[in-house]
Image (cartoon, grey):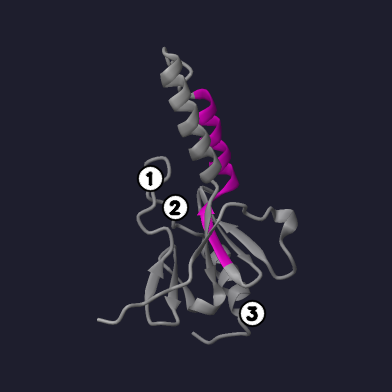
Amino acid sequence: MPSHQRVVRVQTEVPSTDSLGPGDLRIYNADSSVDLVLQGDRILAGLSPKTVAKVRGELDTSGRHDTSAFGGAISQIVKRTVASAIGTHVAFPLSQIRDIRYDDGRMEFDWVDGGHHQLFNGTNVDGKNESNSFRQEDAQRFIDAVRARKGGWSR
């Protein structure tokens, strides 16, 4: 069976809406827990700013009842590590994507190497697996923007 290698990067700094350029776009899933960002020549996928803020707030208030100095120190190290990584997005180069589709609320990629990827498949936020449920009109705007960026593809 052939081995498929894809260039996928991780980006810790997600562009703010203010920094998106002409033709760039950000959409959110139905409950705004995750987002997709088209920026330049890549697609970023990860937790939304709203979800990141919520998790960071919960981290700030949790663990205040550590009874030992050692336990408190360990807790703070873990919290800082999680807080610094929670906003991480996966970056998919457009050059690796053959097509993007919307199917039953889900965004799906077809790779140029023949592979297939369902975004946020199996991702749970607040115990719910609704993170890949995008509104059809938002998904279509995103697909149209990606296709325009790639120079217009056919389905």
**Range of residues picked out in magenta:** 43-61
Left or right: 116 with respect to 54? left
Q: Nearer the viewer, residue 122 or 142?
A: 122
Q: Main secondary structure of the magenta part?
A: helix
Secondary structure of residue under mark 3: helix
Q: Nearer the viewer, residue 1 or 48?
A: 1
Image quadrant where one finds the N terminus: bottom left
Residue type at mark 2 is: Ser
Residue 48 lies, in percent from the top left, at 56, 49
Q: Residues within 10 Å of mark 2 (few under 14, many from 20)?
A: many
Query: To which residue does mark 2 refer?
Result: 131
Secondary structure of residue under mark 2: loop
Are the two marked residues, 1 and 2, in contact with CB atoms closer than 8 angstroms? yes
Query: To which residue does mark 1 refer?
Result: 128
Q: Identify whether 140 is placed above or below 14.
A: below
Residue type at mark 3 is: Ala
Q: Residue furthest top?
A: 67
